[in-house]
Amino acid sequence: MSTLTRRTVLRAIGAAGLAGVAAAVAGCAPTIGTARMPRVPAAYDGPPVTLKFWNGLTGGDGPVMRTLIEEFTREHPNIAIDMYALPWGDFYQKFPAAVTSGLAPDFALMHNFQVATNAARRVIMPVDEILDTVGLAEADYLPVVWGSGVYRDQRWSLPLDMWPDSLFYNRRVLEQAGLDPDAPPTDRAAYEHALDTLASAGISGHWLPAVDPQGVGRGFDSLLWQFGGEHYDDAGTAATFGSRAGVDALTWQQTLIREGWSPRNVSGSDASTAFKNDQNAFLWGGPGALINDLGSVDGLDWDVAPLPQIGERRAAFSGSHQFVVARQPRFDADRLAAVVTFLGWILANSIGWATAGPVPARLPILDSPELAELTAQSHVAEGVEHIRFYPLVPGIAEVQTTILYPAIGDALLSLGDPGAALETATTQASFLLQENAEKYGRA
């Protein structure tokens, strides 16, 4: 294996990737205070207070969160919440800067795979001491979800939801091809049979968004786990996605194109448009992005199910929105008590958030009659026991998006050797993982 230098890696991932990695590394130094959170009561009953809440909910999920905030405020008129939503990329750049400058919001919502990074940067607070106050209990969560906010033996976030990649299918297209629209494929044989049948009817059944590394990369993630692989070693310092499982996963994705089951060089928007116009049978994607989008199309006959098992075991990539408490130079007990009051309320009432697309993280709500009334979400929930999250490693999101996902996209666009593509990406990713371990603190 050739020796890599920092210059080699940075040249390989490009200027855009460099900006993301540099921002992550630059933000890791613990330059802010280490104030401890004061103990707070179970509910705030003090004078009026206005809280600042930051998130990246700029799509259809934003109005849902604002509606929930309005409902909370009606029940708690002494607590107002000023919600500031900005694109996720801007959020992850501006949130640490706001904290280090003393202008932090009171609390925020972020993705589970960004929690360890922000904990290592010391811009969020451990929340172990408020678990009982907000009503979190381990028995109410899947183990993968309960553990998703724990980094270095402390809890840093409170899970709101889960959004596993699922199989969205066009019932009308399946029926017109002679397939059962009420029995979506659940395994590789059935899925490939359906794709063959659709191809015989002149339909490319699975439009693989090779032009969009994020979308196609998450499909690779699910397949890697299904074929028995892992992305990284236990220490989070070496990439392992170039294993036989990774090669099998990427080879199967290429097969979709080689067999004509997917057109070449399509984007996620191409796939979505084809699906909405009855030109495509299957979409792999998250419920937060697709449920309300597809549901807004008049006359579209669709449904959703867990991903089919293509490899040795069932697995699906999932993310989770998680609440965090921003670190403050000094904590105000009243403001913190108001934050805890809201967090306890929304986690107990997360069925309202399910209308945005994701499914609730709390199992009692997941099993409730109210969720059963949300047909698509309840079908997504049938597969949550097989979800997988990225490991809690600082900087992991940057490694995925600047190295792994572009490599997957390039291999699908060129139909080049899967092993060679993953070997190069594995070397680059391992280099950055080791650098991140040093920058964020290995001890």
Image (spheres, grey):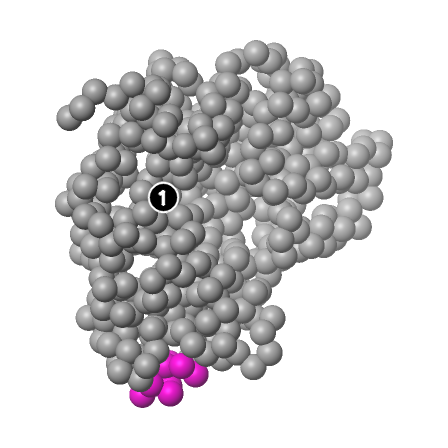
Is 53 magenta? The answer is no
Q: Where is residue 54 in the image (x, y as percent from the top left)?
A: 66, 37
Residue 156 seen in this snapshot:
yes
Q: Quadrant of residue 56?
A: top right
Q: Position of residue 355 (x, y in %)?
A: 59, 61
Q: Give the range drawn in magenta.
A: 172-182
Quadrant (top left, top right, bottom left, bottom right) of the C terminus: top left
Identity of the residue drawn at 34% across and 62% down? 264
On screen, 102 above or below 176? Answer: above
Quadrant (top left, top right, bottom left, bottom right) of the N terminus: top left
Residue under numbered circle 1: 405
**How many residues crowd around disc 1 within 10 Å: few (fewer than 14), some, or many (20 or more)?**
many
Q: Is residue 174 left or right of residue 377?
A: left
Kindly state the secondary structure of the residue where label 1 is placed.
Answer: helix
Q: Is residue 111 left or right of residue 208?
A: right
Identity of the residue drawn at 43% across and 77% down? 279
- Count the labels in the image: 1
Q: Quadrant of residue 398?
A: top left
Q: Position of residue 242 (x, y in %)?
A: 21, 40
Identity of the residue drawn at 31% across and 88% down? 178
Q: Position of residue 23 (x, y in %)?
A: 51, 25
On screen, 86 above or below 259? Answer: above
Identity of the residue drawn at 20% across and 54% down? 251
